[in-house]
Amino acid sequence: RKEVEQDPGPFNVPEGATVAFNCTYSNSASQSFFWYRQDCRKEPKLLMSVYSSGNEDGRFTAQLNRASQYISLLIRDSKLSDSATYLCVVNPRPFLNTDKLIFGTGTRLQVFP
Amino acid sequence: NAGVTQTPKFRVLKTGQSMTLLCAQDMNHEYMYWYRQDPGMGLRLIHYSVGEGTTAKGEVPDGYNVSRLKKQNFLLGLESAAPSQTSVYFCASSYSIAASVSETQYFGPGTRLLVL
């Protein structure tokens, strides 16, 4: 089983739609969780951290479910500029006694007019 | 601030040739990392460094060497390139691990390497 698993997509949605991505992780002791965004042929960039209580940043909402070991990202009112690959990222410490991040393979989102 | 920069941006090598990828950061970060990204595989850690003069192996270190002689620079070397090393290489940096549980990594723009 992969340490971090995501549906690769692609998710093709019209502008204005709401779309949700899920990600599961295998290490129950994982401490930190993030969503990164990666545009085509560009580097990954932090979109948002994911907190236990859930957090929202504008049209983006991240949720963490520790019991089921999954993380979600909800995008409301999708824009064309949201088209990108969204990477689920987990920091498995302290179990592995390291701060190395584990990256999912990403979920591709394509927003069309 | 330039953030994290990488050189070169693109390179073509023949099997058996050697090369060095340079990563530089101007954020005074303690930690630096080298990843490779391949289709369907996600980002995989090659080597990392927790400070000047120290390096450690990541998930896929074979065929690569690294050096961190200066805090701001992290070099990735391929001694004898193989077609399996065709990939996109990303360098990243972050503050000291002790600073925050939720610390993020900042990535460079990547180096596309093709080994023929």
Image (cartoon, rainbow, N blue to C red):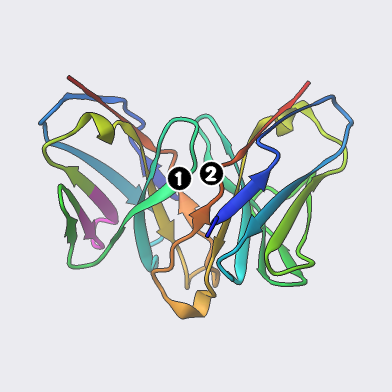
Asked whether, in this view, residue A94 is left or right of residue B81, the answer is left
> Who's the residue at 52% across and 67% down the image?
A99
Asked whether, in this view, residue A71 is left or right of residue B19, the answer is left
Query: In the rendered structure, which segment of residues is drawn in magenta?
Result: A62-72
**Closest to the observer, A15 or B35:** A15
Residue type, mark 2 in image? Leu
Say whether residue A1 is visible: no
Tag 2: Cα neighbours inside 10 Å, few (<14), some, or many (≥20)?
many
**Closest to the observer, B102 or B9:** B9
Secondary structure category for the residue under label 2: strand
> Who's the residue at 52% across and 71% down the image?
B95
Tag 1 subunit: A
View extreme (front): residue = B1
- B45 in magenta: no
- Quarter-of-image position of residue B104: bottom left
**Closest to the observer, A13 or A79:** A79
Above or below: residue A77 compared with residue A110: below
Report the magenta stretch's main SS: strand
Asked whether, in this view, residue B41 is left or right of residue B51, the answer is left
Tag 2 subunit: B
Q: Position of residue A17 (x, y in %)?
A: 11, 31
Q: Position of residue A52 (x, y in %)?
A: 23, 67
